[in-house]
Image (cartoon, rainbow, N blue to C red):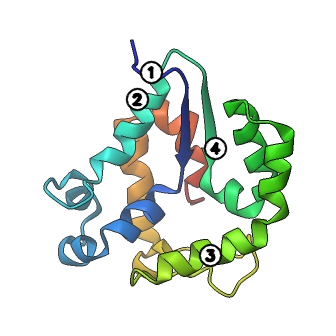
Amino acid sequence: MSKYDRVLLVVRDYRECLLRHNAKQWSEIGSVEAFLDAEGSFQWPGWYIENIRSFHSHEGPKHLLYYEDLIDEPENSIREISEFLGLSERRTDSFLSDLDRRYARSVDAYTSTGHQALTAGRPRGGHQHHAMLHLDARQMAEFDAYYRDREPDLFETYLARYEVAE
């Protein structure tokens, strides 16, 4: 039994998520398996799949959203979230009417903490991939294989969209 009535999960490409938050650790380890199995990092890579596992096992109302869809089609994604949470259409419309300013403020807040926002100065939906800056094709495929081999059901259900075509 979960202590939460409903659960919303936003999933992002595992390479993006993990390298973005653990770039220093990645540069020190360099091996996909060792990196993903490493413990003791600030943001342990294992939490990525643990969050998906928890969502998957939740028996109450749940909603899955992909980060890339939220960035590429924010209006549709925000309407989905709003409907799932039972928010009024008026409240959602009000939020969406000011979306460009909210987007700019979000990027400003992120960069003011010293992070690099590759989306800064680009139109919404123009995101770039951090993983492409740090991984070669073999390493990209190793990330895929790691999750596909260890968590085949979760991979197929939630992550297959990120698999690199060979």
Type of amino acid under label 2: Ser
Apparent side of residue 164 relative to residue 41 in the rendered image (left or right) = right
Q: Which residue is mark 3?
A: 105
Say which quarter of the image contains residue 118: bottom right
**Separation (CA) of disc 2 from disc 4:** 15 Å
- Front of the two marks 4 and 3: 3
- Front of the two marks 2 and 3: 3
Q: Earlier in the sequence, mark 2 or mark 4?
A: 2
Nearest the viewer among 34 and 85 is: 85
Residue that sits furthest to the top in the current view: 1
Q: Secondary structure at mark 4?
A: strand
**Separation (CA) of disc 4 from disc 1:** 16 Å
Q: Earlier in the sequence, mark 2 or mark 3?
A: 2
152, above or below 122, in the image: above
Q: Earlier in the sequence, mark 4 or mark 3?
A: 4
Tag 2 near tag 1, CB within 8 Å: yes
Nearest the viewer among 148 and 114 is: 114
Tag 2 near tag 4, CB within 8 Å: no
